[in-house]
Image: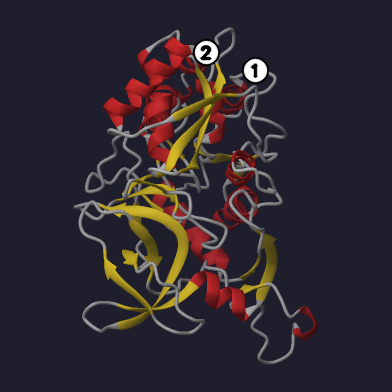
Amino acid sequence: EANFPMFVVFTSGTTGKPKGLVHTHALVAGLVESMRVCFNVDPATDRMLTVAGLGWITGQSYQVSAVLASRITAVLMRGSPVSPSMTRFAEVILKHKVTILKAGSAFLREVMSHSDGMQQVKDMHTGSVLKVASFCAEPVSEAVHTFAMESVCENYINCYWATEHGAIAWGRRFRDVAQPLRPNAHTWPMGWVEADVFVYSADRPELMDCWEARRADAGERGEVVCTSPFPSMFRYVWGNADNFGNPGWTGDREIMLGRYWRKTRLPDSEELWAYVQGDFAVKHPGGSYTFHGRSDEVLNVNGILYGTEHLEGALLRDQYLSAESVVGQCLVVGYPDTVAGEVPLAFIVPALGRSLDLAARWKLYNLVQHTVGPVQMKFVSVSELPRTFTGKLVRRVVRSMSRGEPP
């Protein structure tokens, strides 16, 4: 039966405590349709490389289930895509004639931390065999998207989804001119996703009571929501295991209603249930969206909201502006400030052979001012940043350490 549980997968824990999410057999329908819409898959010619761990949803969904259900060839790559060399993923693409690449942005940020690595990847000309490539799950800065389109595949699209969605929820129809592809990380809701952006009141109601909200204005950041479920979405939060299989089992309803689904009242008195992922987004004219990180990670500096992804993108832009850039890797978190409320604190891993001296800090400070706006920023030089085994930066650990809190 399509709605019977198929597997339990845990969220990564990069931003909070991992939660066990129960997906059903209906997940496969969403995977097959997303493969058709975004990648125009052809069983006769296509080969797909997905950079992911099998224990996480991207591996379960697109490394295994989607390729099998769509009847195309999967190319599996063990280990890091950029080790022992920055061009390892590109070598695999060319050797096995991969036509579809799906990966997060973390490995490209790693390549961008080495100017020679950027040139080496560009010289591989992977675009000669790739027909489409896609980001997944993580917010993507314009700097990373520009590098991806110029050096890996000109048809490098941005897709947004999470463990809870099960399959691509925002993407781009394959080479659809009505959805113009530019290196700006814009992405569009899939046809089966009813989406919107809400600005919620800061007052948190009791469980099952209504949240007050309004629809975000054009260009305004707010919580991205889905106003209706869809087949690939998870059905339950794992819990109440002793009663699993019995009639009426619904998992952990308290987490489901306290964390994900909100009864929402809009200004016109309309009440509806809205699924809240916990990510900030902006809805643009033409129906595209951009995503700006976790809503609980957006920084409130003197009443002005800044996305960590936007600030990191400004710092990474220095890699494009200068071959002598000091920026290798970067991660921004909010740091408490008695005057401003909080200020951005940037952890910088310097590029090989360079140091974050006073001149470099001043240069980066001015770059952020020019790119983002008049925001005060602090810098810390570190030798490395914590990551998951698939390369995602573990923000909650860095944020907790910066505040002297347990991770």
Residue type pointed to by label 1: Ser
Q: Of 136 and 217, which appears nearest the observer?
A: 217
Name the residue: 70% across, 19% down: 84
The numbered dot on residue 120 is: 2
Q: At which x and y percent is residue 163?
A: 57, 58
Name the residue: 54% across, 55% down: 70
Q: Of 266 and 37, which appears nearest the observer?
A: 266
The numbered dot on residue 85 is: 1
Residue 246: quarter of image = bottom right
Position of 198 relative to 45 (above/below): below
Along the horizontal axis of the image, is 66 left or right of 306? Answer: right
Q: At which x and y percent is residue 339?
A: 39, 43
Res. 298 visible in picture: yes
Discs 1, 2 touching: Cβ within 8 Å: yes
Position of 396 relative to 204 (above/below): above
Quick one: which residue is furthest to the bottom in this view? 247
Q: Secondary structure at mark 1?
A: loop
Q: Secondary structure at mark 2?
A: helix
Along the horizontal axis of the image, is 101 left or right of 392? Answer: left
Res. 325 visible in picture: no
Q: How many marks?
A: 2
